[in-house]
Image (spheres, rainbow, N blue to C red):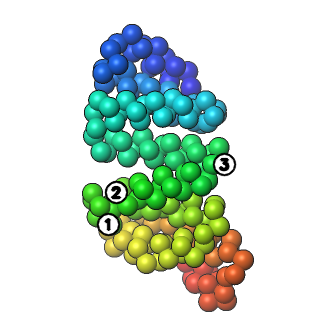
Amino acid sequence: LALGWAAWKTYLGRPVTDNYRCTSMGILGAALRVSRPEEALPVLEANLALNRRYWSDEQSILGAQTIIGGCLSQLGRDDEALVLKREIYFRRVAMHGVSDERAIAAGCNLANSLNYTGMWNEAAGLLRDKVLPAARRSLGADHSLTLRLNVSLVDTFLFDPEYTRDDLLEAETI
């Protein structure tokens, strides 16, 4: 957190269009998110607005939105986070394809939000049909992201009150 504030104070006097100033705001927001997410959200939203206004780089915008989605989840605003994470996932897939690591990570974030909001069937379908096969194919079965996706699928089965014996057997094999 101290480094985030130091970065922000260092570049605060620069013009609003200065890349270092915008980057330092993102660093501050990310640092605040760790311990004070309610204070981080306005900083992260301001950083996103600056990115949209002056740089319009889709990668930077999606990265800023991803951090905001995580912050919303931390604040218990799961419905808002779900809408944002759904948008991020579909934009990543449209830009890079389903097998891109960034799209797979966005799919993992979306599946977790679907679980938090009780949409277990949709989470299971997303993981089983799209994200996990793409991760296994492009990243490999032992990649850390593929393993996290496996855990997400198991969580989906365990959280769903309507799980079936077949679901539990599938979770056990994972």
Q: Residue at x 67, y 75 (%)?
A: 160
* Percent position of residue 98, x then y: 33, 66
Question: Would residue 31 be seen by someone viewing this image from the given angle?
Answer: no
Which badge, 3 or 1, comes first in the chain's sequence? 3
Residue that numbered label 3 is attached to: 76
Which badge, 3 or 2, comes first in the chain's sequence? 3
Does residue 15 lie above or below 136 as drawn? above
* Three-letter code, disc 2: Arg
Q: CA distance from mark 3 to mark 1?
A: 30 Å
Instruction: Tell whether 5 sits left or right of 135.
Output: right
- The quarter in which the N terminus is drawn is top right
Q: Residue at x 32, y 31 (%)?
A: 53
Residue that numbered label 1 is attached to: 99
* Percent position of residue 61, x then y: 36, 42
**Label 2 vs label 1, nearer the camera:** 2
Does residue 38 lie above or below 125 as drawn? above
